Structure formats: C-alpha cells, structure tokens
Amino acid sequence: MGTGRVGLLLLLLAAVLLQPLLAAAAEGVVRIALKKRQVDETGRVGGHLAGEDAQRLLARRHGFLTNDAARAASRKARAEAEGDIVALKNYLNAQYYGEIAIGTPPQMFTVIFDTGSSNLWVPSSKCHLSIACYFHSRYKAGQSSTYKKNGKPASIHYGTGAISGYFSQDSVKVGDVAVKNQDFIEATREPSITFMVAKFDGILGLGFKEISVGNTVPIWYNMVRQGLVVDPVFSFWFNRHADEGQGGEIVFGGIDPNHYKGNHTYVPVTRKGYWQFNMGDVLIGGNSTAGCAAIADSGTSLLTGPTAIITQINEKIGATGVVSQECKAVVSQYGQQILDQLRAETKPAKVCSSVGLCTFDGTHGVSAGIRSVVDDEVGKSSGPFSSGMCNACETAVVWMHTQLAQNQTQDLVLHPMGESSVDCSSLASMPDIAFTIGGKKFVLKPEQYILKVGEGTATQCISGFTAMDIPPPRGPLWILGDVFMGAYHTVFDYGNLKVGFAEAA
C-alpha cells in the first residue's frame, strides 16, 4: 500500500502463501512462495512454515548453475516444499501476500510485501476499539519471550486507510530467516473499513529507510546487516493466471531463473524512498506521450499515472465509467444494505434477493415483479420492476464486492465514480501500451492490462489504468503496480541501487 494505493481492481488477493523458503541459510537466499486459490467459505485457511534446504536452487543472481541444473533443482525444491504452502483467500488475482512469524514462540500473520512503504505493522492484542482488529490475528507481546518494549507512538496514512499504535521490538521470521531485534508497529487503531475487509493482517514494507515512519530500520535492511542474505537483492514473480496453483513468489537474496525469460534491463534508483527511476515515453499503440519518473510498487494493484495520459489511454481502449446510471441508482438507494450484506459474508449471488430487487432461484437473482423507487431515479416506467434493474443490482454487487476487496473506503464504495470499463469483446482491437525503461520498450497487451471482474452476465472488463496526479517535487509520477509486475519479473537490487525488469515466465 504505499503511495496512494489503489488496490487493484480486482478483488483480491492472490492467495499467497508463504512457503518457506526453499532457500538455504548457507546460500544466503530466502525464497517465499505465494499460492493462490479460490475464495473459500470459511475464511483464512491455516498453515505452517517449514524450511527445506534447496541450496542449489536459487544460486545467487543470474544463477551460476546451468539452466538445466537450476530448473531441475527448482522443480525438486518446489515439489518438496509443496506441503509447506499456506493457501490464502483469493478472488480475481488482485493482491499478493504471504506469511511471517513474530515472537518466540512464533505468532503467525499474513502480510503484503510492499515496496511502496517501509514499516512493518500488525494488529495488536491491545487494539480494542477498532472492529478491524477482531477480524485478524493480533500480536500478543506478553506471550513472546523475545519481546522488548519500546512504546513510541506511531501512525501511518495510506491512500486507502490509516493505522496508529506504538512501536515494539521482537524477532521476525520471514521464511527460514529469523531477524533479531526488529522494530515494528503494534496497531491499536484501524478505523478504516479498508482494513476490516482486508484479507491480510498487516503490511511488511520493503521501501527505503527515507520513508520509514519513526525513522525505524526496515526489516530488509536488518536482513542484510545481520548477514541473513548474501546477495543484497530481492525479486518478485506474480502469477497472473488464476487457473494455475502457485500465486507467485518473493525471493530474498537471489533471483529464481525459472520465472523470467532473457536478461533483466536495469535502471538506477534516482531517488531513495520509493524504488523510483526515470522512465521514457509511454507509447499508446506506437504513438508517443510524455515520459516521467516511475516507481515499482508491489503494494499497488493497478497502473497509476498522470490524468492527462491515463485519459488518452482510456479513450483509445474505449473505456467508459464502470458504473452505469442504473448501477449508481442501485448503490445510491440500496448501497448501505448491500454493503452490510457483503460484510456479513452473504453470498454475492443472494444479496439482490436479500434487499428485494431480485428473487433467488438457487443459483442467481431473477427479476421480481415489484416496484422500486430506483425505476423513477433512472427514468424508468413506474410499472413492475424490470429484469434490467435486477441485472443492474447484480452488477452493482459485483462492483461493490470488488471495491471492498481492493480495500477501498466506505465512502468510495457508496459513491461510485471510479475505474473505467471496456467491452470484453473488443480486446483484439485495443492497442498495445508500451513503457520505455532503460531504452527498452516493455509492452503490455490488452489481455495483460484489462482485468475481468465477476462471472456470467455480470462479468465486466476493467481498464488496468487509473489516474493519480502526484504533485511536485515527488511527481508527476507513474506507479507500476501488480499489473505491470505480473507481466515483468522485477528485481530490487539494494546493493547496487537499481531496479531490473525481464519478461515473466
């Protein structure tokens, strides 16, 4: 979640699972697998961390194993570690998160590994007044023999919510690597609906110390300083195919050669804080637009850029407002009821019948012969409620469900303005969008930047581009989130202060 987080449109959260590492302490490589599965009915699926030596798998950087040997070692290690993967709730591949442990004995938490922020925080057992804390695992300082009191107050404001609490210190285990004396925030207030509906407990920041709240040392810095990784780099692979089991992985201390093709193109970090670099032209179907600085941000789901350019892109791909007038009317009249139903974990297919806009036939809503004020709001006749309004309700439910899963605030959910929808049948005619980085064009095809939400008649195709004008001196700025990082394997080279991209495999 770092700068103005736009949580990706599509709901959520690639089930991630922090598979221990396939990495050997001796080799200085920590590998964490994130696995995604379909949303289940019961909530978070429990799991455990377990370590397994795979010293030859991630050899260091650009691998000094032969490709065949590396692939063989990777396959073997992956197979051995399959039982160590923890499945997390996921819907439509919107966010990726994994598991860490804090304290002795270990207390387990799911976190987003976020290159757009620099602090680690998890809910505290002393969080009593925020409902969100009761939906997530909470850190219990009194149960850890390695806990050290700090008590300094802290607060962090993200684009979609805020947390506050105080600093504490304890050991933190990421994969098989145990970081000693790590400062982190125990969140005692999580007032935003963002965190109440989130499928993760906290956030583990991987940005630079320059943006660390309280000037605390980020956990990645301590991994390096404590000699827990030999090579000061970490890398991300995000799987964007929902029908495949493994959701992605983050490798601390190395690069998995199985998850990229060719060589990485590296560009220097131009401003520490975020992983910021200079980017050249953004090309829309081969036509140049202005370039500017960019950041690679694993905590942002979409591609975010200046309004002027995003408007051009969305016009070229035929994007229009995602929420129709009918849907807006439904949200305006029934939004709070729908929101309450979704928060109560009512199945989306049953929500419209619950609020009286459809009847439920066992699989989905169907038109009900009733009259609604919504008809009048959208200029419909005053006759029986049409099947169109039932369909509008179902579409609105999908949209609201998506917004909640993206960690949007309640105000934004109940006042739809936002993303842009496109005709799902028009992908073949849409232009490629290319980003010039390090003199090379990194192309996104329509199937990579268009996201599908919902199923059946309620399916919508959403533009992966959203506007955000970041003022000087930091901006203007592009934020290359999961849509881009899913297409291009990303390396964050802390030792040499550079970022690298290669086609994901």
Image (tube, rainbow, N blue to C red):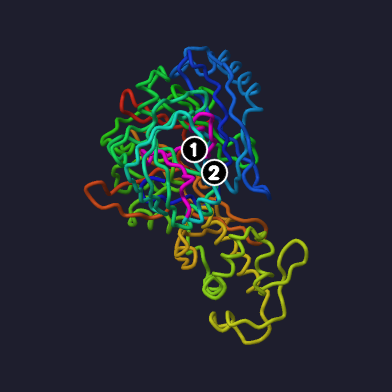
C-alpha distance separating marks 2 and 1: 32 Å
Examine the image and state in which quarter residue 392 appears.
bottom right
Where's residue 411, x and y in %?
A: 45, 65
Q: Is residue 91 left or right of residue 290?
A: right
Pointer 2 or 1: first along the chain = 2
90 or 8: nearer the eye?
90
Identify the amino acid type marked 1: Ala
Can residue 234 be found in the magenta stretch? no
Using the image, determine if residue 84 lies above or below residue 385.
above
Labels 2 and 1 touching (C-beta < 8 A): no
- Within 10 Å of disc 2 (Cα), the crowding (few <14, some 14-19, many 20+) is some
For the C terminus, the image quarter is top right
The residue pinned by badge 1 equals 487
Where's residue 404, x and y in %?
A: 52, 57
Q: Is residue 410 visible?
A: yes
Identify the amino acid type marked 2: Ser
Find numbered disc 1 in the image and state the secondary structure of the residue it sits on. Answer: helix
127 or 182: nearer the eye?
127
Point out the stretch of residues depicted in magenta. Answer: 101-128
The residue pinned by badge 2 equals 137
163 or 96: nearer the eye?
163
Q: Residue at x 33, y 32 (%)?
A: 217
- Within 10 Å of disc 1 (Cα), the crowding (few <14, some 14-19, many 20+) is many
Q: Residue at x 51, y 35 (%)?
A: 143
Find numbered disc 2 in the image and state the secondary structure of the residue it sits on. Answer: loop
Q: Is residue 396 visible?
A: no
Where's residue 358, x and y in %?
A: 69, 72
Using the image, determine if residue 469 lies above or below residue 78.
below
Give the farthest residue toward the left. Answer: 473
Where's residue 61, x and y in %?
A: 43, 19
